[in-house]
Each structure stands twice: as structure tokens, then as C-alpha cells.
Amino acid sequence: MPTDFNQQVIDEFRANKGRVGGPFEGARLLLLTTVGARTGARHTTPLGYLPDGGDRVLVIASAGGAPTHPAWYHNLLANPDVTVEDGVFTYRAKAAVLTGEEREGVFARAVAADPGWGHYQDRSGRVLPVVALVPAEDGPPAGPLGDMLRTVHDAFRRELALIRREVAASGPRVGAQLRVNCLTLCQGLHVHHEREDRHMFPALERRHPRLAPALERLRAEHVVVQQLLERLQHLLSTDDLAPETLQREVDRLIQELEAHLDYEEEQLVTLLN
């Protein structure tokens, strides 16, 4: 992408906590900052990414089908220590280029989900590198705690909306990348609720005893959401999962989770701020 267009996307991404319009509206997008291999200067590039079922995410050095690898790829080969912004968190990460069967399997999964990756590779005349970005640190986003909570919740809402759209657009079978997207979301929600139960809620209860009934309700809702997540993960483990079955379970999860998130924000955001 031209530098001026890149900067417009970067500015919009940062101003709207990861949401952008135009050709990238509704896309999974991150900002990758690398250190120039020759200049040592920091360079930020907006990139589409793929969830990978855990902490790491995957990016593909497509350069829009250009015959040469993009500059950010050369930079991370020289220095794999990078910075990632995902709209909620900004964190240091280690870049690792996938090789062999792992690379082939991930790329095949990406092409099955979006044939555009295959078109880019055919047009480029090169094997498109696939890079894993592995977090090197873990910490909360900056800002008031209540705003932070709402920002994290909004990221879950956005991912659920993306998955719902992907399920609706899938063919007669649920593809491998869509399964990975769902499993990544399940893991993220489980970790988020576990941290609330173990750390945030007990601290709030000690400081604000009057919150006890609301916190008990929130804990009970965590149990319901976890049951839905386990049901979803069980379905994803079956070979003959139909999109309409997955759609039904995703809709149930969205309904329960959005009501839970709304109530939690109503009870806690102002207090946390």
C-alpha cells in the first residue's frame, strides 16, 4: 500500500481502537512495527492477520501479490523483536517465520478461508512467507480501568460479529480457519472471565461490599457462558459440523454474552474509572 494510504489507515486504527472503514471495514487488522534493517528507524504497517488458536497470530507477507517481499518482512528477518497493536493491547512480540509442513498447513488453511491469498501467491511468483507473532509480554491496555474494560469487551463483540458473518458465508462445511477463529475466541473469553473471577471481582468486593449481589450475578453468568463455550468447542471437534448448527450456537453465545457484558459495564465501568 502507498505510504500516505498506510498512514491514513494507521491513524484511523489508533483513533477508533482497531476499527477502520473503507476496504478494510470488518477485517481483522493489526499494526506491526518493525525496526528498519538498514536504517534502524521504526516502521509501522497495517496488516491483515489470522487467529491461530492461542496467543500468537499469523501474518502473511503478500505485499498485494508483488514479486518481492515487503519491507516489513526484511526488517523482522534482521530483527525479530517487533511491536503489535491490535486495537486493545499494544505489546512486544517475537516474529518467527514458519517453515516446512507447518507453513504449508497454515497457508492452505488461509487459502481455504480466503482464496485471495492463493491469488496473491500465484501473481507474485514467489512462496509467500507466513510469520507467527508471539507475545513477549502481557499487560493491560493503558487508561482508566473502566474504559479498559469496555474496550476489551468491544473487542470480543467485534470478533463475535466477524465469526457470525464468516459462519453465514461458509459453504456446506465449516472450514479449518473458521474453527480456529472460534477456538481462539473461546480461549480468550475463558481467560478474561477467569481473571475477573480470580482478581478483579475479589478486589472490588473488598473495597465495595455493596457490589456483592452484582458480582454474584456476574460470576453466575460466567458459568453459563463457560458452558456455552464448552458446547461450542465440542461441536468444533466434530468432523461433520454443519454451518447452521454452528450458527445456532454462536447466536446463543452472542445473546448471553452481550447481555452479560452490558450488565457488567453498567455496574462497574463508572466505579472502576
Image (spheres, rainbow, N blue to C red):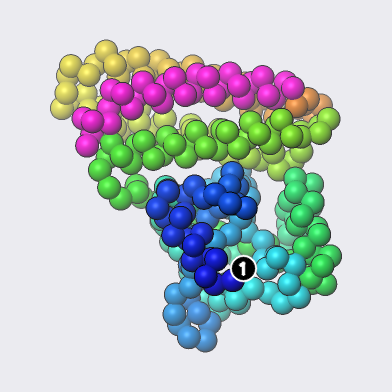
Q: Position of residue 204 (x, y in %)?
A: 22, 28
Where 151 falls versus 269 (above or below)? below
Give, as a three-letter code, the residue at label 1.
Met
Residue nearest the observer in this picture, 199 or 67 = 67
Magenta stretch in the rendered image:
244-273
Q: Secondary structure at mark 1?
A: loop
Residue nearest the observer in this picture, 9 or 89 = 9
**Rendered residue at 40%/53% (across/down):** 15
Instruction: Sort mark 1 into few (<14), some (14-19) or many (20+) by Cα contacts within 10 Å.
Output: few
Say which quadrant the C terminus sits in.
top left
- Residue 73: tell me if it is visible: no
**Residue 79 in magenta stretch:** no
194 relative position to 216: left or right: right
**Residue 252 in magenta stretch:** yes
Q: Position of residue 177 (x, y in %)?
A: 71, 43
Residue nearest the observer in this picture, 176 or 160 = 160
Prevailing secondary structure class for the magenta stretch in the rendered image: helix
Q: Position of residue 171 (x, y in %)?
A: 81, 33
Where 90 falls versus 209 (above or below)? below
Q: Which residue is mark 1?
A: 1
Q: Position of residue 109 (x, y in %)?
A: 76, 48
**Rendered residue at 75%/49% (across/down):** 114
117 relative position to 58: left or right: right
**Rendered residue at 77%/55% (across/down):** 116
